[in-house]
Image: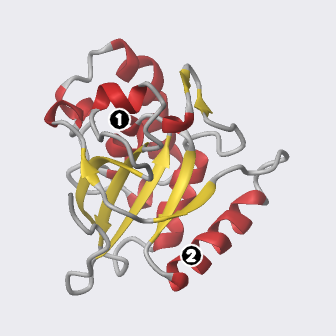
Amino acid sequence: MTDSHQHQGALRTVVLGSGCFWCLDSLARRLKGVERVRSVYTGGTGPAVYEAVCAGTTGHAEAVEITFDPGVLPAEVLYEVFFSTHDPTSLNRQGGDVGPQYRSVMFYADDAERTELEQAISAAQQSFSRPIVTVLEPLGTVHEAEPEHQDFYGRRPGVGYCQFVIDPKIAQLRRRWPQWLAEDTPA
């Protein structure tokens, strides 16, 4: 359990949920300026363990804590990747992942960040014909997910979920944002 909204010099940390954390985790790790990525549980009050969160009764979302250098990767680009690589118009569902733990959510640490995230949702809405249902929630305690969920794609790219759900998102990232890919991005 940590307070995840820490500013370390010029670095900034945001916590976003876009369905299964394995997806956003794998995408964030490929972006320039990203210093740290952690799959986490937050937004609820129940036990912060995978089985309990998956049951959908804890209130926690699967989310990703992304620490990045906004001088290298503008927050607006990170938000564009976030909105474009999941369906923010789908309530509590991303593909086959169903339940409140898979909600589209942006966590804010203060009023300034809340305003920034509201503006990001408003800007993203222009790209969608259906209303965006991404929720804004205050950032509370962040619980690191179990070790097997950290960099899941990097460790297990051959798993079916990775091949059928994450690979197309990585291909989209390469097509749409090649200028924002880190030099050492895996193939």
As helix, strand or loop, the secondary structure at mark 2 comes to helix
Residue under label 2, please give it: 114
Is 175 left or right of 8, judged from the image as shown? right
Q: Residue at x 21, y 33 (%)?
A: 154
What numbered label is drawn on residue 22? 1
Q: Residue at x 56, y 29 (%)?
A: 99
As helix, strand or loop, the secondary structure at mark 1 comes to helix
Is 181 left or right of 176, judged from the image as shown? left
Q: Residue at x 47, y 71 (%)?
A: 75
Residue type (three-letter) at the residue carrying disc 2: Arg
Which of the two residues, 169 or 176, is positioned nearer the viewer here? Answer: 169
Residue 33 in view in this figure: no
Closer to viewer: mark 1 or mark 2: 2
Residue type (three-letter) at the residue carrying disc 1: Trp
Q: Quadrant of the N terminus?
A: bottom left
| Number of disc labels | 2
Residue 68 image offset from top left, x and y in percent: 30, 69
Q: Is residue 51 above or below residue 9?
A: above
Q: Residues within 10 Å of mark 2 (few under 14, many from 20)?
A: some
Q: Earlier in the sequence, mark 1 or mark 2?
A: 1
Residue 55 image offset from top left, x and y in percent: 43, 24
Which of the two residues, 37 or 171, is positioned nearer the viewer here? Answer: 37
What numbered label is drawn on residue 4? none
